[in-house]
Image (spheres, rainbow, N blue to C red):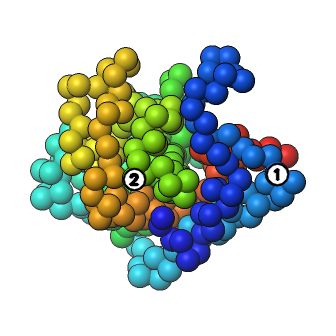
Amino acid sequence: MHQGHNIPWDLISSNFKFVRDDKRFTPPFTGLVSLDKPNTTNELKHLMKKIAGTIPTFSETERKKYQRSFTPLLTVTLFSDELRDRYPEYLNKRNQKVEHWIERAYKSDAESRYDTRDAELADVVKVLLYENEMTSLLMLAQHPRVPIHTLTHLSWGHHFGFSRVMESALQSYMFFNAVAAMDMLENGAYMELPEYGSIVRDTMFSMDYPAQQIPHRLFFQQCGMKLESITYENVGIDVAVHGDYGRLREHLKLLFALMYRYDLLLRESDLDPDWENQLVYSFPLRAAVRVE
């Protein structure tokens, strides 16, 4: 389990049990159910607060690696040609220049902003978060003519802003740490959970502006999952990810890094990541912690 010295993951195993084909539910349910002990809610809220506090702590440490302020240049290259050539689906010569970001900003009486027409820029942010290009992202966050914060949430029925980086990272991070705490990794029982199929679908299926999928696709493909074999009926749940624990540990480290980089970028943009609210809807806490 990742960050086990800071996060009491054992509170999951002491407050949940795994059931298989439980006939008390219609249809029969396979998954984690709360033990509903007297202290379950308080213990899981404590776990939630520990996770929600650990991420910003790393974010603050990461922020110290960079200069406090950036000159708002009107002409600057945001990423290297080598990086651009590595991600031709998302990066190009236009969005490589800050001038393009300034020109694309929609100016209203209230403020400058981006909208769904600028979703390609949200994908650029996703790639830069993955590649740890935080100097460029912090510069954009401080730039008075680049309203990067308005790329956080974009949608037209489903959403594709750069908050998807946080959502997909948190979803997988919570899932794999939870099943590890429940001793469900070694025996492969985690593959029976519907949440595993959801993670695979969100990772491997095509969608609009999908750059948040990059690290997850790479991980599953390294585990032997083939994109062409994934369908709604067969989401690849027969592919185990625990065969190489070293690889899984590195993946968890990356997921955590994506979350604190996201936290850093949002705070630089004067936004609150609101981790507790994100966590209360995450697996398995959503089944046992009530929203107040």
Asked if the residue at tag 1 contacts the one at tag 2, i.e. Cβ–Cβ closer than 8 Å, the answer is: no
Identify which residue is drawn at 29% across, 65% down.
246
Q: Position of residue 131 (x, y in %)?
A: 29, 60
Please give the label number shown on residue 193.
none
**Dot 1, crowdedness within 10 Å: few (<14), some or many (≥20)?**
few
- Would residue 159 appear left or right of 15 to someone viewing this image? left
Up-down relation of residue 58 to residue 106 (above or below): below
Q: Label 2 to label 1, Cα distance in Å?
A: 27 Å
Q: Where is residue 234 in the image (x, y as percent from the top left)?
A: 34, 22
Residue visible at 79% across and 54% down? 40
How many numbered marks does the figure carry?
Answer: 2
Query: Going 63% across and 56% down the picture, which residue do you hit?
Result: 13
Q: Report the side of 292 relative to 166 (left or right).
A: right
Q: Which amino acid does label 1 sit on?
A: Lys
- Image coordinates of residue 177 in percent, x first then y, are 50, 57
Residue 240 appears in view = yes
| Front-most of residues 259 and 155 | 259
Mark 2 element type: loop
Q: Mark on residue 186?
A: 2
Q: Is residue 246 left or right of residue 164?
A: left
What residue does disc 1 label? Answer: 37
Q: Is residue 245 above or below residue 236?
A: below
